[in-house]
Amino acid sequence: MVMNKILESSEYILSKIPKKPKIGIVLGSGLGIYVDQIQNKTIIPYQDIPHFKRTSVEGHEGRLIVGEVHGITVAALQGRLHAYEGHPMEEIVHPVRTLAALGIESLFLTNASGGINDNFHPGDLVSISDHINLTGRNALLGPNIAELGPRFPDMSNAYDPELIEIMASVAKNHHVEVKSGVYCSVLGPTYETPAEIRMLKIIGADMVGMSTVPEVIAANHLGLRVAGVSCITNYAAGIKPEKLNHADVKKVAEKAMVGFATILTETIGELKKLGKI
């Protein structure tokens, strides 16, 4: 059933686009306007694609954008589903699995997150070096689908070291500061308590959010190369006295767009130059 859904989604998309994508992009809260950087776009609303679900969170438009960046065909998911919306894991990772069926080999995931590390501040961009999954869920629960990947996928390098290195080099060359840190995924939808943030800091989390990890797990299962960028949109609970709200998250992410767009666009250009795509 899962494979049939992936096939039906991918066949519909392929009927609408001129060329198969090589790069996949998932755009998180407030980062969806990156699609303005994509040339020769084909725009497909999620509700038109078989088995794709509508997004419901502000800042997640719910569209698939297929076009070109530096002449490379990319497929960008403008918005994602979250477990806190009540979606099962199969539906959350279905879009990423569909992109793999379209032919992508590398996946860039983005999100908005709360800064836990004392050196992280709103507006900072952080390359995800690793993650901690505290959602209590895993995208691969249930019978393994052998056509997608092995029963026990290795997660030693969940975020591809070469992609991370290339992103860091691109950021340095374009004078964009990018930090590095461990992302912790929690279920949500409530923001964390100050006590929970103190715990996350102790176990090694630099930032916290409510997404990304299911897609990273599914992508690694598929054998895709993965890179992730977090935009720190707020201090995590208890670090500063102010209360947290989603509107502020979206605004800060949009302000960080120039640096974010440079990193993502020029990393794709560098991969083309190096013959990696």
Image (tube, rainbow, N blue to C red):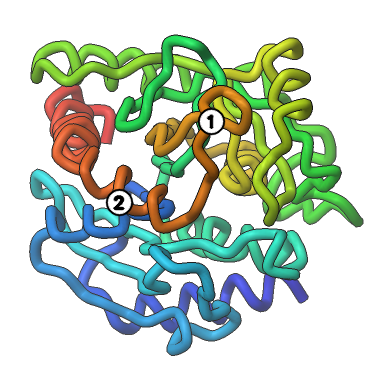
Q: Residues within 10 Å of mark 2 (few under 14, many from 20)?
A: some
Q: Can residue 27 be seen in this view?
A: no
Tell me if 200 is positioned left or right of 151 in this view. left
- The local secondary structure at tag 1 comes to loop
| Foreground residue among 221 and 83 | 83
Q: Position of residue 212 (x, y in %)?
A: 57, 44
**Disc marking residue 251:** 2
Q: Where is residue 193 in the image (x, y as percent from the top left)?
A: 73, 36
For image coordinates 36% across by 53% down, the residue present is: 250
**Disc marking residue 154:** none
Which of discs 1 and 2 lies nearer the camera? The answer is: 1
For image coordinates 74% across by 49% down, the residue present is: 187
Name the kind of residue labelled 2 in the image: Lys
- The local secondary structure at tag 2 comes to helix
Residue 101 higher or lower than 53, as above or below? above
Q: In which quarter of the image is residue 52?
A: bottom right
| Foreground residue among 181 and 7 | 181
Tell me if 230 is positioned left or right of 98 in this view. left
Q: Do the residues labelled 1 and 2 touch (CB within 8 Å)?
A: no
For image coordinates 71% across by 44% down, the residue present is: 149
Residue 203 higher or lower than 271, as above or below? above
Tell me if 41 is positioned left or right of 12 in this view. left
Residue under numbered circle 1: 241
Q: Quadrant of residue 271?
A: top left
Name the kind of residue labelled 1 in the image: Pro
